[in-house]
Image (tube, rainbow, N blue to C red):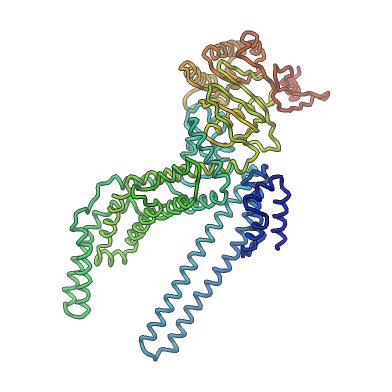
Amino acid sequence: MNPAIEYALNILASHTCTATMLSAFNSRLKFKELIKETNSKFIKLFANNILIDVLCSFNAMNNANTALLAYQNNILLFQQQLAVLKTKRHRIGWLRLFIVLLTAFMVYITWHSAIGLIISIVIAGIASFLYAVSIDTDVKETIANIERLLAINKEEINILNEDFHHREDGKIFEPAHHPYTQDLDIFGTASIYQYINRCTAEQSKKLLAKNLLQPKQKEQILQTQKAVKEFTEKTNWRQQFQSYGFENAVTVNTERRIINWLKQPIIFTEPYWRWLTVAFPFVTLGCSALYIFDIITAPVYSLIVFACFLFAGSLSKKIHATYLLLSRIVPEINTLYQQLDYLEKETFKSALITGIKHSIESKDAHKASVEIYELKNILNRFDVRLNIFAFFFLNTFLLWDLWQMIALNKWKNKNQQAVPFWFKAIAETEVISSIASLAFNQPSWCFPEIADNHFTLQGKKIGHPLIAAAKRVDNSFTIEGTSKIALITGSNMGGKSTFLRSIGVNTVLALMGAHVCAESFTISPVNLMSSMRIADNLAENTSTFYAELKKLQQIIEAVNRKEKIFILLDEILRGTNSFDRHTGSKALIKQLIQHNAVAIIATHDVELTILENDFPQSIANYHFDVQVDKNDELFFDFKLKDGICKSMNASILMKKIGIEM
């Protein structure tokens, strides 16, 4: 047996989950037989794939190296396949040349033979050449697909290595004024959107952004989690689905053009138009036959053709508006077909995905992919009019445009209500796939539990998703009930803002049904609001202080409306003097407690911590501290601790830059 397979089997046999995994194959012997039956040139890579799939399926390789190993293995496999396919295509090229030369040679040596023999040789040569071309086309498409898969796996490795800042940042989806997106780096460079987006269609990207902008309900979150878990185990399927999307990404403009066409009134519905499409070719082709056999003269035939041309042209003018709506969208229609066909063929168990599959079925139980394929063929025939010579002949002699218009009318009547669901299905599937990629890449993270009561937040080893694991410092934190304020004091650069963002970002991820960067995480369905990163706005003539007041006003209004919100505040009222800042902050905290709000507030104002004495059931103090050695060097551990910060570093930093204290 191949040493690579023996190695894979030994790994399986020695693993702690051996019994469970081997039971999936019934026995170690059955697994060996499975390998023996595989006549693959890439047997070593196949063994690796089997090993990885089994270990991942049973969560036996719960570390970041799982994803890296899988992607590296895929890259090796695809590179091997590409080499074979490119060699095959090169040989097909020589074969096509050989067919042309052989056909020419056979015609040459049989030139004085019967005309039937020569025609047969030419026909056989053309048929062989076209067959070789069709094979070459298939190989070319396969190569393009594998090259896309290769690029996808390389990109995943880049993302694992924290190299993702070049990716699409979703900034176009960020509202001008949103409760938390700017504070938490949801969009933009080095953002959550950049990190998790694997969508190809514009509709999918928009839906992903929507999920990041507003939380789902508990039942929706739980359904999404189940779907994501199922998708996480289908890495190869997800990547192929993504590859189809990359070929010609589906756009909102194409969807809009199709929807607009569906809304247009149907023309050429009368029965006589259908009869005309059958009768008209008999007239034109019959006249052509009569002209060929000299039954009618050239002037008469020319007059008939000209009249037919004018009649066909008048019909084409009425059809032109429809053509403008549907022209040049075949590549995207083909992408829609490939993705939905691939979705239909896969078996899923989760309710969300099975519901998506059910939504794309027509009333007659016709598959969406079949209907889209039919539309693709009609539009391909419609696009023949781009060739002016073909357009002249087909329209003048066959009423080609009318044929396609009648076919489109029939298709519209059958699928008018279903089309929007097809685009929606692609969007929802790609969003789930994006979230699943995050889960696959970060197996040490967890799926959060969703609490029923308001309010609960419990997390162990919570970290910021965009900070590499080697650099990240995780913290555990709990806040339960309403009228709860967590005050966090600490030194500059101690980790207060990063901690707030870690809580905020993981809350956003949890409430969209995604993996979160924590060992365990429980959160209540809640609307997140924050005031952390405030900037002035010259266009609106708004100062930093006034900009912050506007954000705080939105928070206060939501609190007064008794909405279920979770508040994150960092250095509130920083734009005013220390007295007003302290007075205003103290009043705001009391108001939040009075209205049963829940908040985490980071502050340098240590005097605010005294409020714990007045509200012991509502306020809890935490801090990040700093250690200073004898040379005034600062050391941060970035660990959240109970109580009030006693060590500050501002004076030391000011001394270091030359301020005499």
Q: Residue at x 34, y 47 (%)?
A: 363
Q: Nearer the viewer, residue 188 or 16?
A: 16
- In this rendering, the answer to whether 196 lies above or below 620 is below
Where is the N terminus found, in terms of image quarters? bottom right
* Image position, residue 235 (x, y; %): 57, 49
- In this rendering, the answer to whether 624 lies above or below 122 is above
Q: Residue furthest right?
A: 630
Number of marks in the rendered image: 0
* Image position, residue 572 (x, y; %): 58, 19
Q: Nearer the viewer, residue 481 or 465?
A: 481
In this rendering, would 358 be left or right of 25?
Answer: left
Where, by quadrant of the figure, is residue 436 drawn? top right
Where, by quadrant of the figure, is residue 399 drawn? bottom left
Q: Does the image show residue 505?
A: no
Where, by quadrant of the figure, is residue 561 drawn? top left
In this rendering, would 78 be left or right of 354?
Answer: right
Q: Residue at x 16, y 77 (%)?
A: 296
Where is the C terminus found, in terms of image quarters? top right
* Image position, residue 538 (x, y; %): 50, 26
Q: Nearer the viewer, residue 71 or 445?
A: 445
Q: Does the image show residue 65?
A: yes
Q: Residue at x 51, y 39 (%)?
A: 170
- In this rendering, the answer to whether 211 lies above or below 7 is above
